[in-house]
Image: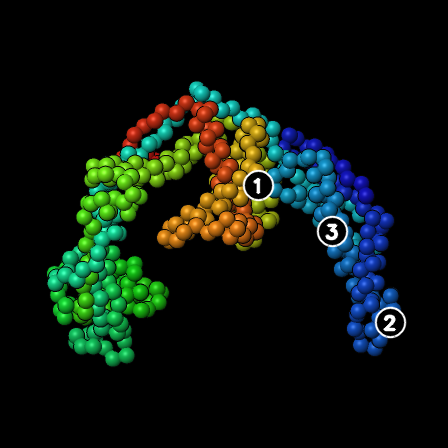
Amino acid sequence: MNITQEKIDDLNAKLKVQLSSEDYQEKVEAVIVNYRKTASIPGFRKGKVPMGQVKKMIGKSVLVDEVNKLLQEAIYKHITENKVEVLGNPLPLTSEVDWDNATDFEFEYEMGLAPEFKVTLEKKSKFDYLQIVADKKMVDHYVTDMAKRYGKMTQPEKSEKTDLIMGEFIQLDGEGNALEGSINHTSSVALDIIQDKKAQKALVGLAEGDEVKLHITKDFSNDAHHMLNIKKEELETLDAYFTFKVNKISRMEPADMTQDLFDKVFGKDTVKNEKEFRAKVKEEVEKSFEGESDNKLKNDVILHLIKKTKLSLPDTFLKKWLAATNEQGLTEEQVEQEYEQYSKSLKWQLIENKIIKDNELEVKNEDVISHTKELIISNFAQYGQPAPEDKKLEEIAVQVLGNEEERKKVYNQLYDVKTMSLYKEKFNLKNKEVTYDEFVKLASEK
């Protein structure tokens, strides 16, 4: 076997692989011999089929398979041992092969090469770091939500638009009578999620035993299919009238602003009065937005570095590779339409990998396990459950990381943390306080 690489330019190369019968013949013969031992062919005893007959039957297909395996192994070995940084995978240039008569073969491949470039993270590069500040309206919302979460359920006489009503839906015919064999279902209705304002208004002010007529379509509520016990697809085409009879009204009365509530939310004696409680809520809410601020900074850094870094790609090769390897099959027009976004994504991948390498950022296995345990504990806490004991926690973490996708996700999260820390250290960041609405507006501009 002989492999040679020819450099066409800085971003493209050609790979030539030459095979002789010595490279593949032994493997081909072994496959044919094993097949002969187990082959069941009419007119011959098992294992006694003449070798010539077996070769005639499967010889060509075995040759093709074994040569292709050799090629893949040889190309992978060449790229790995010579540390060739390729983009995509080598694409074959050889069109026709005389599998029936040839014993020596020559195959050619074209390769796209990763560019050489530098990435500089400088203090003169300035970014606004948008720090989301919880305004009074937002703090009021979270305080009310927490008070409701630890409040008590009551049964008021009349419904209000934040109540939960249990009642019976009966579908009507064109004359306003119950439609036989149609929808008849008892369920609960959360009034604050009713999107149809006219219907929501009609459901306010009702008492137990009251009936109201409702016009229900897909715009009634995103949850209407559950209320009516129908499939979501059926809701898409639904346009019908119903009576709704109130069976029960429930209301969550928020807990009073007392030490009991403060202790339940933040732990015993962490805060001592309503002023401290609201300040703590504000602090926790703002802390929960740090991830969004980091994401905004990362997006700004991505756009900045893609624009600033002088980085060219083997565009012609990559377009051909995308068309050849896409499972759905892309036309040239589709490749052209999607290529700009693909090339930006690839450029950022190359830049980020370069940053990680140049700054010797590393995620160790113990970091991955520790972070996974934290995620598991957080997940248990979300459902009000205590964290598993150490041994059980370790078992769950190992099980989670046994899934390649989950393991990759954790590695990516940890590398994101490390690169974000690096950006905050290397770049000139100016803290800018904004409300959440202002943040959304600024983030959607780019």
2 and 1 marks in contact (CB < 8 Å): no
Question: How far across and how far down the image is residue 421, in percent?
Answer: 46, 30
Question: How far across and how far down the image is residue 119, in percent?
Answer: 53, 26
Q: Classify residue 357 by image quadrant.
A: top right
Question: How far across and how far down the image is residue 414, in percent?
Answer: 50, 38
Left-right relation of 69 to 199: right
Residue that carries the numbered disc 1 in the rendered image? 365
Amino acid tagged 1: Asn
Give the secondary structure at mark 3.
helix
| Dot placed on the residue nearer the N-terminal end, 1 or 3 | 3
Residue that carries the numbered disc 3 in the rendered image? 69
Left-right relation of 406 to 264: right
Q: Quadrant of the N terminus?
A: top right
Crowding at mark 1 (Cα within 10 Å: few <14, some 14-19, many 20+): few
Give the secondary structure at mark 2.
loop
Give the secondary structure at mark 1.
helix
3 and 2 marks in contact (CB < 8 Å): no
The CA distance from mark 3 to mark 2 is 28 Å
Left-right relation of 302 to 13: left
Seen at 43% across and 19% down, the residue is 124
Amino acid tagged 2: Lys
Crowding at mark 2 (Cα within 10 Å: few <14, some 14-19, many 20+): few
The image shows residue 276, relative to residue 372, as above or below, that is above
Question: How far across and how far down the image is residue 209, in percent?
Answer: 14, 70
The CA distance from mark 2 to mark 1 is 55 Å
- Nearer to us of marks 1 and 3 is 1
**For residue 420, which numbered disc appears in the image?**
none
Q: Nearer the viewer, residue 410 or 56?
A: 410
Left-right relation of 209 to 428: left
Seen at 12% across and 65% down, the residue is 207
Amino acid tagged 3: Lys
